[in-house]
Image (tube, rainbow, N blue to C red):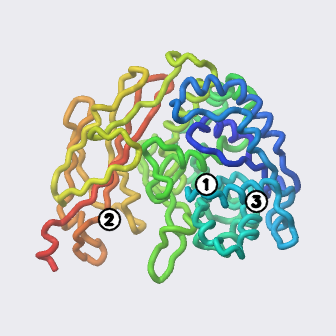
């Protein structure tokens, strides 16, 4: 685990039930691990956790510093597959992972990897002959920041069914990976991403503050490069962890394992591509765009949480809007069946801000998650979104007719149910820094005349 990003993770720790924190090797640190660096950060966290809890819902508190300390373990102090073999004992980190994986709960176990994956490889090798090995592997949800040792490819080759998000590219060619959209200039997207909130000056003003931020180092390459792994899991109404194709702050990924039956819904997920209008007003199309499109909002979110570390006074800092769509305050996508060519309306006017801030509403179609092919512009039908009131909290959505919304485009084959259409409502407050919450609506167009077309 990389210490730089561990500070950021701790500011979101109330979102997760953290089961283990393991210091590992990688291609950048091959022969030792450094759990002591993690302990130093927890010492700083201990000084601010009470402040953080003043801003968290009582049902989702931040963990105590001691409970976090107890989770810190070491992986094997060797590189990659050198740690895997019949006669090689499990590291203490692998022992903890095995314990959590074999616990009686059937909940998915997310393994977020910021270095090499030999701890996971040790466990998979250990359980390979168990009668319940397949069931245990089904519990795993892995998200790695590219491959940083030789274990990742081995794992995916041995057990291609494991849910495994990972950018694939030439060795150490990280500029090709989606996750660099977190803060990199993205040379292929010049003029697209806003770089104003990933500068040394912005970090000094917004992150290097208080006890937790005081030891946040000046960066040499990019900041928070591993952060997409946990941003992917943030429940803010945008992403769905079990659906990498939907897209979220942690990027968008599609299945890479192809069989005669088509794409698998599990296994390896690799980079997808979004088309986003950049700060230059032009469209930019890349894998990094699946992350940098959200950069302003997640950077403001991190800055707000760093402000939380400074005070327990709720009135002095900003908090997230709470979104309602048609009276539903949940976080999961809302699924709606609608007639092709018809109109459906949505009402987010019951949304509110806990600080009493003014809210603004932005509704838009997120086209790429609907697409099965490369060119979503040809395959995915448009929707027309019309505001029904001054603040756009209420909208009317008109679907395309069946010949556009309920059809296989290339083969011109009519469908009774067309591709699902993803609608996002973005609710932003006017606090400092501004905070954003979301809700996703998935509209399923239906051709009511389909029977007469057979």
**Residue 437 x, y percent position in the rendering:** 43, 37
Would you place residue 147 above or below residue 53 in this image? Answer: below
Local crowd size for mark 1, using a 10 Å CA cut-off: few (<14), some (14–19), many (≥20): many
- Please tell me which of labels 1 and 3 falls first in the chain: 1
**Local crowd at mark 2 within 10 Å, few (<14), some, or many (≥20)?**
few
Q: Gap between marks 2 and 1, in whole Å?
A: 35 Å
Residue density around tag 3, few if under 14, some if 14–19, many if 20 or more, within 10 Å:
many
Q: Is residue 177 visible?
A: no
- Badge number at residue 1: none
Label 2 SS: helix
Which SS class for mark 3?
helix
Is residue 360 toward the left or the right of residue 387 in the image?
right
Q: Nearer the viewer, residue 207 or 287?
A: 207
- Residue plotted at (44% across, 56% down): 246
| Label 2 sits on residue | 378
Q: Residue at x 49, y 23 (%)?
A: 318
Secondary element at tag 1: strand
Could you say where residue 247 lies in the image, as x and y percent from the top left?
A: 46, 53
Q: CA distance from mark 1 to mark 3?
A: 14 Å
Reading the image, the residue beneath label 3 is 119
Question: Where does label 1 land, which residue?
Answer: 110
Residue 285, image x, y percentages: 47, 55
Q: Nearer the viewer, residue 371 or 327?
A: 327
Mark 2 or mark 1: name the one nearer the start of the chain: 1
Q: Rounded to the nearest whole Å, what is the CA distance between mark 2 and mark 3?
A: 44 Å
Image spot of residue 277 (x, y percent): 41, 46
Front position among marks 2 and 3: 3
């Amino acid at each position: 685990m990389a210490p730089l990003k561990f500070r950021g993770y701790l500011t979101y720790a109330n979102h997760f039930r953290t089961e283990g924190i393991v210091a590992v090797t990688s291609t950048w640190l091959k022969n030792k691990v450094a759990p002591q660096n993690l302990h130093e950060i927890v010492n700083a966290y201990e000084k601010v956790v009470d402040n953080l809890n003043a801003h968290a819902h009582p049902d989702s508190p931040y963990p105590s510093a001691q409970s976090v300390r107890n989770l810190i373990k070491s992986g094997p102090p060797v590189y990659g597959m050198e740690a895997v073999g019949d006669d090689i004992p499990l590291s203490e980190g692998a022992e903890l992972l095995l314990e959590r994986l074999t616990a009686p709960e059937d909940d998915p176990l997310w393994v977020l990897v910021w270095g090499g994956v030999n701890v996971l490889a040790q466990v998979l090798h250990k359980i390979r002959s168990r009668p319940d090995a397949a069931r245990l592997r089904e519990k795993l949800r892995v998200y790695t920041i590219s491959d940083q040792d030789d274990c990742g490819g081995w794992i995916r080759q041995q057990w291609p069914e494991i849910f495994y998000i990972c950018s694939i590219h030439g060795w150490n060619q990280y500029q090709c990976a989606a996750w660099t959209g977190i803060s990199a200039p993205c040379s292929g997207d010049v003029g697209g991403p806003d770089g104003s909130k990933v500068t040394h000056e912005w970090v000094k003003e917004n992150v290097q503050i208080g006890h937790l931020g005081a030891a946040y180092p000046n960066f040499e390459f990019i900041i928070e490069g591993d952060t997409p792994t946990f941003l992917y899991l943030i429940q803010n109404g945008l992403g769905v962890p079990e659906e990498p194709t939907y897209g979220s702050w942690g990027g968008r990924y599609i299945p890479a394992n192809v069989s005669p039956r088509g794409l698998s819904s599990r296994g390896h997920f690799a980079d997808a591509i979004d088309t986003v209008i950049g700060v230059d007003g032009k469209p930019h199309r890349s894998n990094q765009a699946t992350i940098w499109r959200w950069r302003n909002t997640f950077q403001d979110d991190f800055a707000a949480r760093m402000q939380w570390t400074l005070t327990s006074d709720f009135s002095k800092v900003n908090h997230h809007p709470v979104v309602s769509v048609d009276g539903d305050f949940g976080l999961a996508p809302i699924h709606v069946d609608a007639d092709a060519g018809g109109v459906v309306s949505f009402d987010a006017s019951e949304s509110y801000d806990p600080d009493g801030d003014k809210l603004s509403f932005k509704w838009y179609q997120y086209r790429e998650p609907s697409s099965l092919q490369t060119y979503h512009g040809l395959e995915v039908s448009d929707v027309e979104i019309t505001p029904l009131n001054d603040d756009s909290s209420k909208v009317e959505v008109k679907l395309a007719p069946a010949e556009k919304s309920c059809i296989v485009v290339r083969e011109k084959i009519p469908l009774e149910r067309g591709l699902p259409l993803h609608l996002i409502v973005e609710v932003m407050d006017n606090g400092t820094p501004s905070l954003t919450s979301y809700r996703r609506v998935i509209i399923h167009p239906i051709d009511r005349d389909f029977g007469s077309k057979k």
